[in-house]
Image (spheres, rainbow, N blue to C red):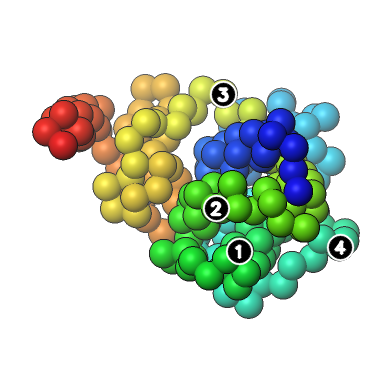
Amino acid sequence: MLTPAATARLDRHLRDLPELLAYAHLALQPGSTTRSSHVTGATRTAPLPCSINVLSLLGPAASDTVRDPHGDQDGLVPAVGTITAWARLHAEEHGQQPADTNLGTLLAYLTSLLPWAAEQPWADEYANEIADLHRRCTPLALLRPRRRLMQLPCPRCHLQSLVREDGHDAECATPGCGVILRPDEYDQRATAYADALNAA
Ligand SMILES: [Zn+2]
């Protein structure tokens, strides 16, 4: 059972995580030019070995991922296992199922069930694990301040994973998606999106 303040913090963490994971993923991609000068103090893990692991973070979560709350986890690999395991527990005990196993979907699902989850006997452990994930992603997300996450969802994978680096096209950060939007294409989508919202 969580206090209102702890529930509000968990809600913020769950809403932050898609963006943090996207930035963490970008920060650890091979070829990052600003990485080495900022990484000191942000993480004890060398960036390059992480990059392969982080690549799996934003794709579909493996259904057989084992939760390992006491393991000696390193890097961001546990993000998939942690989020998947808690989503599975929610599905088993609450009954409502997530639409699919993408991390973005699972995080939205967890957010939607938070009022219920905050009342459960495991709520403290849940909040602690999500807080730990949030804390470990944050310094990685700060490594690429010149890359901005865009407001619109990706037209192909529908995650909020479009990122624009200064002077470049917007690219989707989801592995395997590969959408690239020129600035005028992005603006067209933004206009169409706003029109659709106004018409609704
Ligand atoms: Zn995409």
Determine which residue is flagged by label 1. Answer: 90
The spot of residue 89 in percent (x, y) is 65, 67
Kindly indicate the quadrant of the structure image that contains residue 70.
bottom right
Q: Which residue is mark 3?
A: 145
Kind of residue at disc 3: Pro
User: Residue at the location (32% across, 35% down)?
Assistant: 152
Per the image, label 1 sits on a secondary structure element best described as helix
Label 1 CB sits under 8 Å from any ligand 1 atom? no
Circle on res. 113: 2
Which residue is under mark 4? 71
Among numbered discs 1 and 4, the one appearing first in the sequence: 4
Tell me if mark 2 has few (under 14), some (14-19) or many (20+) residues whose alpha carbon lies within 10 angstroms of its own. Answer: some
Mark closer to the chain start, 3 or 1: 1
Residue for point 34% across, 41% down: 153
- Contact, CB < 8 Å: mark 2 with mark 1? yes
Please name the amino acid that badge 2 sits on.
Leu
49 or 152, which is in the foreground? 152
Q: Position of residue 191 (x, y in %)?
A: 17, 28
Reading the chain from its start, which is encountered first: label 2 or label 4? 4
Q: Nearer the viewer, mark 3 or mark 2?
A: 2
Q: Secondary structure at mark 4?
A: loop
Identify the amino acid type marked 4: Gly
Q: Nearer the viewer, mark 2 or mark 4?
A: 2
Marks 2 and 4 sit apart, C-alpha to C-alpha, by 27 Å
